[in-house]
Amino acid sequence: MTVATMLKNKGSDIISIGPDQTIGEAVALLGSKGIGAVIVRDGGGALAGILSERDIVRGLAAHGTAVMDHKVDSLMTAKVQTCSPNDTAEMLMKRMTEGRFRHMPATDEGDALLGVVSIGDVVKSRISELEHETEAMRDYISGHG
């Protein structure tokens, strides 16, 4: 399954925050939306970074609760790995596992944001693919296919 299909199935809503907003605001946004990472966009709406729960936990470990008043850009990952609509679930699983991250923005060739794919989306799509392959194999073996 491709990223384009995953985004079509889950939707392409992009929850974002500005780099000058506070970590406290980011925490409130993550909590209210029930998500594990938020896209950081610059003033022109372009991808500036990504801020995850893990980034916030590391910030808390280093600075204590004072980190809640720090700016988002102080903890965000600025060098964001992105994927394209034609990337497959298998490709994303490998990249996410090797890079040890759980969220990846999808961009088009012009770097416009298309959506965000999580490791949960990737696993769900892979399971779906494997179920279809198993069913096709059963049908073939039983003579129904």
Image: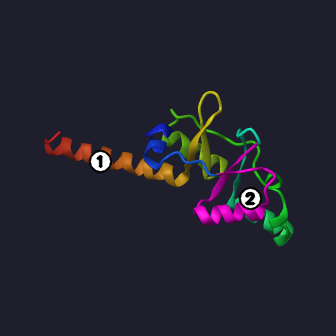
* Residue 70, image x, y percentages: 84, 61
Relative side of 140 to 14, left or right? left
Instruction: Report the magenta residues as a range.
Output: 16-42
Relative side of 126 to 105, left or right? left
State if disc 1 and disc 2 touch (CB < 8 Å). Answer: no
Indicate the quadrant containing the N terminus: top left, top right, bottom left or bottom right.
top left
Relative side of 71 to 35, left or right? right
Mark sitting on residue 134: 1
* Residue 99, image x, y percentages: 66, 47
For image coordinates 80% across by 68% down, the residue present is 61
Mark 1 neighbour class, 10 Å CA radius: few under 14, some 14 to 19, many 20 or more: few
Relative side of 88 to 25, left or right? left
Which secondary structure lies at badge 1?
Answer: helix
Mark sitting on residue 104: none
Measured Cα–Cα span from mark 2 to mark 1:
39 Å
Is residue 35 located in the magenta-colored stretch of the structure? Answer: yes
Amino acid at pointer 1: Thr
Label 2 sits on residue: 55
Q: Nearer the viewer, mark 2 or mark 1?
A: 2
Farthest residue, direction bottom: 65
Please tell me which residue lies in front, 74 or 1.
Answer: 74
